[in-house]
């Protein structure tokens, strides 16, 4: 009997967020609230939350979800945040978490790489594929344009 391909195991978003509001990404409370809400908007189940101030200005944190994790490290003095959003399964929508977090950080630009992980063509040899794009945003107004590589 021939083996068949399976759905990917997960989706991993690596997000560079520029031109963020320093008051937002410099606040442990705000960053934590944003990423917990991003997990909820994606339909994920939050298990554990750990955030802290990273001297002298930044915030580091992770939201552990049953489907994997959402994490960040911020540099408010540069208006920059690095986001890592990985989910497995088919019921969670990590792209919704990405969109929410980028908008909530009040970013001007985002550079996003989406990695589809755990692709199997039926031979149980797993691989990944990726696409990358950049979005120029108007603060609070959504996408101005999407450029895919």
Image (cartoon, grey):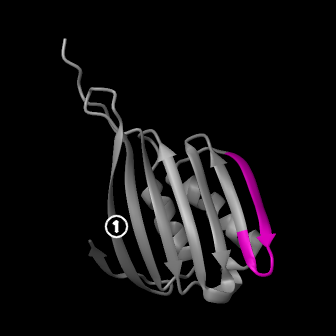
Left or right of 44 in this view: 127? left
Viewer-closest of 142 and 69: 69
Indicate whether 5 appears above or below 45.
above
Magenta span contains residue 17: no
Viewer-closest of 139 and 18: 18
> Residue 117, image x and y in percent?
39, 45
For the N terminus, the quadrant is top left
> Residue 115, image x and y in percent?
39, 54
User: Residue at image x 70%, y 61%?
Assistant: 61
User: Residue at image x 66%, y 80%?
Assistant: 75
User: Residue at image x 42%, y 84%?
Assistant: 137
User: Which SS type dominates the magenta stretch?
Assistant: strand
**Mark 1 residue crowding within 10 angstroms, few (<14) / some (14–19) / many (20+):** some
Q: Which residue is mark 1?
A: 132
Left or right of 7 in this view: 104? right
Left or right of 10 in this view: 57? right
User: Residue at image x 80%, y 76%?
Assistant: 55
Which residue is most to the front? Answer: 125
> Residue 53, image x and y in percent?
80, 71
Indicate whether 65 appears above or below 134.
above
Magenta span contains residue 55: yes
Which residue is most to the top? Answer: 1
**Which span of residues is magenta-colored?**
47-59
């Amino acid at each position: 009997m021939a083996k068949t391909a399976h759905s990917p195991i997960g989706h991993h978003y690596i997000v560079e967020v520029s031109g963020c509001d320093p008051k937002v990404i410099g606040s442990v409370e705000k960053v934590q609230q944003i990423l917990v809400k991003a997990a909820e908007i994606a339909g994920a189940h939050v298990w554990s939350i750990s955030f802290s101030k990273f001297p002298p200005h930044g915030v580091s944190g992770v939201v552990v979800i049953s489907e994997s994790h959402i994490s960040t490290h911020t540099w408010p003095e540069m208006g920059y945040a690095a986001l890592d959003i990985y989910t497995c399964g088919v019921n969670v929508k990590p792209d919704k978490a990405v969109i929410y977090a980028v908008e909530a950080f009040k970013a001007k630009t985002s550079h996003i790489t989406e990695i589809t992980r755990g692709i199997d063509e039926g031979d149980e040899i797993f691989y990944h594929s990726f696409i990358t794009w950049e979005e120029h945003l108007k603060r609070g107004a959504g996408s101005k344009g999407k450029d895919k590589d």
